[in-house]
Amino acid sequence: MAEYIEAATEPLSADKGTMEAELNAVCAELQQLFQEMEELDSMWDGPASQAFAVQFQTDYQIMQDIIENLKGFIQCMQYAADEYNKCENTIAELISAIRI
């Protein structure tokens, strides 16, 4: 009984594309939020404003870290798909080189 693992890279590539699109949308929204916070900061003074700004900066940095982690994950997905495809092509070349 033969056992093998088959990997379809098309769904992986599709998921990667979806994640990239969603991540780009999140980045755009985060940039818009940052600009709006700068606007708010110019109109609002006092200790509450300062506390809010400090918390926003903390949350903003956390979001930046999450974005970087997701970008790394997307790169790993691309690497996995590339390696599977490369291996599959190598095997196909080896099989086609066999003369019977």
Image (spheres, rainbow, N blue to C red):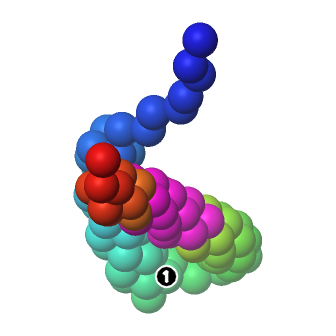
Judge the density around disc 1: few (<14), some (14-19), many (≥20) Cα neighbours within 10 Å. some
Question: Could you tell me which quadrant the N terminus lies in?
Answer: top right
Q: Amino acid at mark 1?
A: Asp
The answer to whether 79 appears left or right of 16 in the picture is right
Tell me, yes or no, if residue 40 can be seen here: no
Measured from the top left, where is residue 61 in percent x and y? 65, 74
Percent across and percent down for residue 94 are 38, 60
Circle 1 sits in a helix, a strand or a loop, which is it?
helix
| Position of residue 56 measured from the top left corner of the image (x, y, whole percent) | 62, 69
What residue sits right under mark 1 in the picture? 41
Q: Residue at x 49, y 82 (%)?
A: 41
Q: Is residue 59 magenta?
A: no
Q: Quadrant of residue 78?
A: bottom left
In the image, 51 versus 17, the foreground residue is 17
Residue at the bottom extreme of this rendering: 42
Q: Nearer the viewer, residue 30 or 69?
A: 69
Q: Main secondary structure of the magenta part?
A: helix
Q: Position of residue 45 (x, y in %)?
A: 57, 82
Residue occupying the point 36% across, 38% down: 8
Q: Quadrant of residue 20?
A: bottom left
Left or right: 44 in relation to 90: right
Residue at point 53%, 31% (across, down)? 5
Residues drawn in magenta: 69-88
Which of 36 and 92 lies nearest the eye of the viewer? 92
Front position in the image: 6 or 79:
6
Q: Examine the rendered structure and indicate whether residue 83 appears above or below residue 10.
A: below
Is residue 25 visible in the rendered structure shown here?
Answer: yes
Which residue is drawn at the image coordinates 44% and 38% (left, top)?
A: 7
Compared to residue 56, the image places residue 25 above or below, namely: above
Q: Is residue 85 magenta?
A: yes
Q: Which residue is farthest top? A: 1
